[in-house]
Image: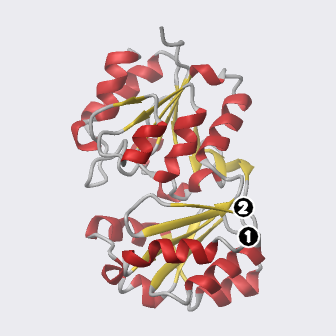
């Protein structure tokens, strides 16, 4: 018998959203029904807060969000962070310093926005970004002449540093190179990216923090995900559900498996097990 669910945390890309980054009518209706039951609907994403689509922010039941893999837990109503776990300026600069030795595009997330530079912004296809992802990046990045110089001069901390590799075969080599920097959590959500957070910034830790903040028993939480960066959240939640399009590693970490994101797997599981 499943505990009564009070909070549902949802990864966005590859999970709640379809392959074209759209929220389906099926998923929207299922979440609205959950909200009517008083269930907290929590986007839990590697995106910065500005990357959460308006259609999702406006859903009933959506007040809080886990952003940048747990780098910030946000109150969307006031647009303020409730809890932050960030890379220091020194850590962020070291990550980018190592990344610059590879053919990559990198962007640190600072105060809810991604920071990029013209040679990345104007050549995203070079780093394997599909047109739909390029469109999202254009809407959620601030362009500066030189990212490294900007981060050095502002001494900004970073919620996350995202790296896209032009050659995905270098992914594990770069992961190994980055692993020498103390205090990092290194994960991935796509075949050609790495996501660098502070060690304790995981979706799982953020979910546990938010559940405690809202006085929701962990056993009454549910989480959906498809990527490596979702594994801590699927393990932390009362029940963790992997999407049908998730990797075997993610499925192994989950309590259950639903249909793919393009088959409205979130709605299918919610209708079957929650509503």
> What percent of the width, then of the height, locates residue 40?
54, 27
Crowd band around label 2 with a 10 angstrom C-alpha radius: few (<14), some (14–19), many (20+): many
Depth check: give the residue in front, 251 or 82.
Answer: 251
Crowd band around label 1 with a 10 angstrom C-alpha radius: few (<14), some (14–19), many (20+): many
Question: Mark 2–mark 1 contact, CB under 8 Å?
Answer: yes
Q: Is residue 55 placed above or below 259 in the rendered structure?
A: below
Q: What residue is disc 1 on?
A: 157
Which residue is drawn at the image coordinates 57% and 66% (left, top)?
A: 113
Depth check: give the residue in front, 38 or 186.
Answer: 186
> What percent of the width, then of the height, locates residue 226?
40, 46
> What percent of the width, then of the height, locates residue 52?
47, 52
Depth check: give the residue in front, 31 or 265.
Answer: 265
Depth check: give the residue in front, 35 or 178.
Answer: 178
| Among the 4 quarters of the image, the one containing residue 91 | bottom right
Q: What residue is disc 2 on?
A: 86
Q: What colour scheme governs how the chains and residues are painted in the rendered image of this protein?
A: secondary structure
Which residue is drawn at the image coordinates 38% and 17% (left, top)?
A: 273
Q: Is residue 56 placed above or below 217 in the rendered structure?
A: below
| Among the 4 quarters of the image, the one containing residue 120 | bottom left
> Relative to 168, is 232 on the left or the right?
right
Determine the secondary structure under disc 2.
loop
> What percent of the width, then of the height, locates residue 127?
36, 79
For marks 2 and 1 on the same chain, the one whose residue lies earlier in the sequence: 2
| Among the 4 quarters of the image, the one containing residue 30 | top left
| Real-space Cα separation, disc 2 to disc 1, in angstroms | 6 Å
Q: Quadrant of the C terminus?
A: top left
Instruction: Name the outermost residue toward the left.
Output: 263
Instruction: Name the outermost residue toward the top.
Output: 1
């Amino acid at each position: 018998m499943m505990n009564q669910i009070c909070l549902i945390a949802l990864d966005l890309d590859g999970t709640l959203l379809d392959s074209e980054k759209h929220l389906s009518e099926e998923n929207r209706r299922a979440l609205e029904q959950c909200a009517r039951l008083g269930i907290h609907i929590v986007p839990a994403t590697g995106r910065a807060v500005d990357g959460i689509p308006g259609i999702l922010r406006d859903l009933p039941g959506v007040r809080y969000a886990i952003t940048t893999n747990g780098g910030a837990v946000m109150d969307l109503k006031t647009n303020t962070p409730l809890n932050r776990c960030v890379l220091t300026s020194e850590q962020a600069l070291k990550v980018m310093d190592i990344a610059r030795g590879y053919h990559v595009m990198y962007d640190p997330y600072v105060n809810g926005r991604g920071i990029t530079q013209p040679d990345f912004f104007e050549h995203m296809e070079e780093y394997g970004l599909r047109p739909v992802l390029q469109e999202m990046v254009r809407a959620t990045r601030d362009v500066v002449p030189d990212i490294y110089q900007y981060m050095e001069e502002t001494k900004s901390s970073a919620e996350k540093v995202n790296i896209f590799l032009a050659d995905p075969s270098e992914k594990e080599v770069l992961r190994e190179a980055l692993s020498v920097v103390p205090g990092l959590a290194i994960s991935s959500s796509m075949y050609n990216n790495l996501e660098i957070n502070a060690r304790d910034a995981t979706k799982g830790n953020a979910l546990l923090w938010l559940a405690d903040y809202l006085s929701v028993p962990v056993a009454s939480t549910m989480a959906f995900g498809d990527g490596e960066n979702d594994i801590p959240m699927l393990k932390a939640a009362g029940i963790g559900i992997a999407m049908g399009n998730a990797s075997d590693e993610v499925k192994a970490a989950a309590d259950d498996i639903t249909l793919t994101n393009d088959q409205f797997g979130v709605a299918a599981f919610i209708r079957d097990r929650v509503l």
